[in-house]
Image (spheres, grey):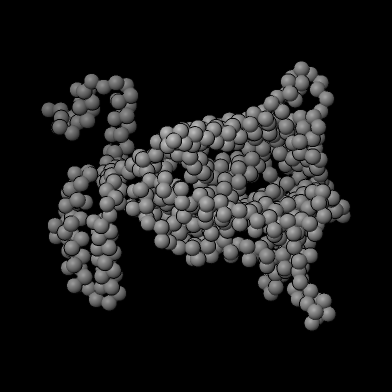
């Protein structure tokens, strides 16, 4: 379980770093406006298009990665364990 | 007593250097020779040494005889790994997300947004509690203290509440499951620091002020109660699962 | 008869007799050079003795300690926050010293010299934008780390006796960190800085009895101007660094003496 913690932590912090960078570039029109979650700008070059696409990819990687390793996998393990316990007691 | 026991250990141990203090008077001797405050000091030293020694003999905890981890080198070396990672994060994010420098100061033009940095939002939110500043009937609805002073006092109250924690909560319980009440207080305080920070940026949040003020005080209490309930429920199973030596070492009071 | 001494303490001859790699040779030569002048062997011996006295036994790692089958300590990252905030503080100090070479704490002119110097740092100076960015981000990380550090200490009960003193010291340090942030926030003298300063003056004035005196002392008057920015600058680069560094040393020293509280 604890190994899962560091996997989730690594995924979360790395992906969140990439996300906050790209979101600061493409989804922050100005300091006084919506920051980080505004609608993305129209891409002018291919790199912009890739960056805008990756913003969402990294955001969901961070959220789902943490969710998977911190919540879903531990719950799954607990369930498997509980089922086995029940089977062995019966 | 302790003198006799520690002598061979300290002097011959480790470096192999033998301290030239065969003539150095023992604490017992020094104690008998001295009077007044210095005598009291030696007496206390002796007691403290004996207490340590007794605790060590009583303890079945043979691996380590202090209830703390050495800072150097163990903790520092372990810390280095994760610290280096986040120092790298600082360098990277400083390169990619440059800071903002707005318009120059203009005393004659009040901007729409007046905000300190994010870490002062909680304090700024406490300054904005003036709707809760009570008006007194006796004074004809007048307020007994000004709104600004009220805000400053709120800050003082919060900081001193944090400061008195170690004087109220004593004992050997460490983990939140061992002390659900204090964990609930902590979670409530943490949630309060967020909700009160939300009041600081109240004009950016599409909720009415009255609702937000209510939320600011209700949410921490609710989360505190939930924490308490969850920890109480977890406690039994958790204590059972916990390593037994841990509890032999520090039975929860 | 030769005047050259040929005794057993001829270190050069000894070095020649031994078959050494270049690294070993350089090390030994510099050690001998320093020792002949500064007698460092004595000090090294004292240090060594102290080291062995302190580390009479190595403790078990946390996972061994509690027979955990885990290879990784679940809450570990939260235990490194104190160290991390010191590292962030050092980064901020280094970049801050460099920024201080180019910054002018003055409100003269329109826009003010302070604002202009920040603009010059970010646009004209080589790596200036990165320098300012690094200073600001390390300050943000330090503040965040200090807050999280406090939360970690609270939830693991690490503040309990005999560590109350360090908890109080920590509260003083976190407050000083916030003052550090606040004074630094005012220095660019932009709109945000000016109006944040305005709030500060109003807060100081609201305090009874000592309020006006405090506002005079910290802000140099009841309206913001030249005196304010100079005071903020002196606080930020002279007073606070000394005080905070000394208190951090004390804070860490106490942790060092008492050991890390029983880990989670």
How many labels sit on residues? 0
Residue found at the far left of this picture: C1
* Residue at the (25%, 57%) spot, across then down: B58
Residue C158 visible to an observer of this rendering: no
Q: Is A15 rendered above or below residue B196?
A: above
Residue found at the far top of this picture: A46
Residue A43 falls left or right of residue C166: right
Nearer the observer, C52 or C194: C52
Residue found at the far right of this picture: B108
Residue A55 falls left or right of residue C147: right
Q: Is B99 rendered above or below residue B70?
A: above
Q: Is C16 rendered above or below residue A82?
A: above
Q: Position of residue A69 (x, y in %)?
A: 56, 32
* Residue at the (27%, 52%) spot, across then down: B60
* Residue at the (77%, 49%) spot, across then down: C192
Nearer the observer, C230 or B24: B24
Nearer the observer, B159 or A61: A61
Q: Position of residue B249 (x, y in %)?
A: 34, 53
Nearer the observer, B101 or C33: B101
Quadrant of the image occupied by residue A13: top right
Residue B157 falls left or right of residue B136: left
Q: Position of residue A11 (x, y in %)?
A: 58, 30
Residue A45 visible to an observer of this rendering: yes
Q: Quadrant of the N terminus of chain C?
A: top left
Q: Is A2 rendered above or below residue B37?
A: above
Q: Position of residue B229 (x, y in %)?
A: 57, 54
């Amino acid at each position: 379980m604890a190994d899962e913690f560091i996997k989730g932590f690594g995924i979360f912090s790395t992906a969140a770093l990439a996300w906050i960078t790209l979101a600061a570039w493409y989804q922050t029109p100005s300091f006084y406006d919506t920051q980080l979650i505004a609608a993305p700008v129209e891409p002018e070059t291919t790199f912009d298009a890739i960056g805008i696409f990756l913003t969402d990819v990294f955001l969901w990687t961070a959220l789902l990665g943490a969710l998977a390793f911190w919540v879903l996998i531990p719950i799954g393990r607990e369930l498997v364990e509980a089922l086995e316990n029940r089977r062995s007691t019966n | 007593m302790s003198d006799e026991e520690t002598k061979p250990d300290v002097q011959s141990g480790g470096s192999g250097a033998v301290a030239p203090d065969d003539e150095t008077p023992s604490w017992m001797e020094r104690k008998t020779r001295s009077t007044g405050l210095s005598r009291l000091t030696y007496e206390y030293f002796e007691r403290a040494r004996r207490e340590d020694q007794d605790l060590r003999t009583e303890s079945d905890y043979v691996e380590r005889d202090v209830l703390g981890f050495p800072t150097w080198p163990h903790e520092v070396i372990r810390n280095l790994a994760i610290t280096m990672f986040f120092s790298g994060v600082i360098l990277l994010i400083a390169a990619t997300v440059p800071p903002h420098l707005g318009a120059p100061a203009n005393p004659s033009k009040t901007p729409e947004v007046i905000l300190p940095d994010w870490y002062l939002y909680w304090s700024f939110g406490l300054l904005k509690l003036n709707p809760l500043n009570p008006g007194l009937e006796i004074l004809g609805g007048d307020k007994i203290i000004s709104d600004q002073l009220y805000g400053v006092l709120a800050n003082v109250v919060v900081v001193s509440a944090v400061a008195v924690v170690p004087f109220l909560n004593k004992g050997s319980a460490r983990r939140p499951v061992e002390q659900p009440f204090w964990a609930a207080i902590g979670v409530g305080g943490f949630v309060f620091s967020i909700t009160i920070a939300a009041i600081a940026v109240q004009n950016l949040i599409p909720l009415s002020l009255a609702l937000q003020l209510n939320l600011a005080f209700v949410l921490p209490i609710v989360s505190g109660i939930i924490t308490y309930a969850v920890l109480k429920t977890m406690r039994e199973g958790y204590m059972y699962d916990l390593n037994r030596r841990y509890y032999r070492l520090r039975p929860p009071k | 008869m030769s005047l050259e001494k040929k005794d057993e303490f001829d270190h050069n001859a000894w070095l020649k007799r031994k078959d050494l790699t270049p690294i070993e040779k350089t090390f030994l030569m510099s050690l001998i050079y320093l020792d002949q002048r500064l007698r460092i062997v004595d000090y090294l011996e004292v240090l060594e003795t102290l080291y062995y006295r302190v580390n009479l036994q190595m403790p078990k790692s946390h996972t061994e300690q509690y027979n955990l089958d885990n290879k990784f300590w679940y809450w570990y990252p939260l235990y490194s926050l104190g160290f991390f905030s010191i590292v962030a503080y050092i980064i901020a100090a280094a970049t801050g010293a460099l920024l201080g070479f180019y910054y002018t704490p003055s409100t003269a002119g329109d826009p003010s010299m302070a604002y202009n110097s920040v603009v010059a740092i970010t646009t004209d100076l080589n790596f200036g934008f990165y320098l300012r960015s690094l200073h600001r981000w390390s300050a943000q990380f330090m503040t965040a780390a200090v807050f999280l550090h406090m939360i970690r200490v609270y939830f693991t009960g690490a503040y309990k006796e005999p560590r109350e003193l360090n908890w109080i010291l920590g509260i003083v340090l976190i407050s000083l960190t916030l003052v550090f942030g606040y004074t630094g926030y005012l220095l660019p003298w932009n709109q945000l800085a000016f109006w944040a300063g305005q709030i500060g003056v109003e807060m100081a004035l609201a305090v009874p009895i000592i309020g006006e005196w405090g506002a005079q002392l910290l802000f140099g008057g009841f309206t913001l101007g030249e005196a304010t920015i100079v005071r903020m600058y002196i606080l930020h680069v002279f007073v606070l660094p000394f005080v905070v560094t000394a208190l951090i040393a004390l804070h860490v020293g106490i942790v060092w003496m008492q050991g890390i509280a029983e880990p989670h």
